[in-house]
Amino acid sequence: GLRVSPVGDQFKVLSLVTSPDQFLDYHLHEFITLGGQQVSRNQVTTAPYYPVTDGLCINGSIYYAAWAPKL
């Protein structure tokens, strides 16, 4: 999913690159920050999970509920 919210003349995008249906040992996320003439991209991996709600952006952070099949 994609979420965009302006924070101080910047837009931050969170993209879940891998699908929860791929049954991998990890998820790959990409964070893109857009501001003025600059674009930065960062990638991070997490333990697998399934998002169960839409995201909510509060002060530049995205919050959403998720379920993880493993502890």
Image (cartoon, rainbow, N blue to C red):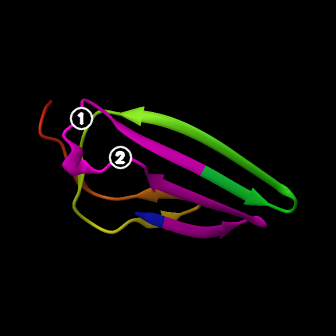
**Amino acid tagged 1:** Leu
Closer to the N terminus: mark 2 or mark 1?
A: 2
Question: Badge 2 local density, few (<14 within 10 Å), some, or many (20+)?
Answer: some
State the separation of the CA atoms marked 2 and 1: 9 Å
The residue under label 1 is: 24
Neighbor class of circle 1 (other Cα within 10 Å; few <14, some 14-19, many 20+) is few
The numbered mark at residue 18 is 2
Which of 63 and 43 lies nearest the eye of the viewer?
43
Residue 31: image location, x then y, percent: 57, 48
Q: Is residue 55 magenta?
A: no
Q: Is residue 12 magenta?
A: yes
Q: Is residue 29 left or right of residue 13?
A: left
Q: Secondary structure at mark 1?
A: loop
- Callout 2, which amino acid? Thr
| Res 60 visible | no
Magenta part of the protein: which range?
Answer: 3-31
Q: Secondary structure at mark 2?
A: loop
Residue 32 at x, y percent in the picture: 63, 52
Which residue appears farthest toward the front when viewing the image?
22
Q: Is residue 48 shown above or below 62?
A: above
Q: Is residue 24 above or below residue 21?
A: above
Give me the residue at 45% from left, 44% from top.
29
Pointers 2 and 1 in contact (CB under 8 A)? yes
Q: At 57% from the left edge and 59% from the top edge, which residue is drawn?
A: 13
Which image quarter holds the C terminus?
Answer: top left
Q: Position of residue 47 (x, y in %)?
A: 29, 33
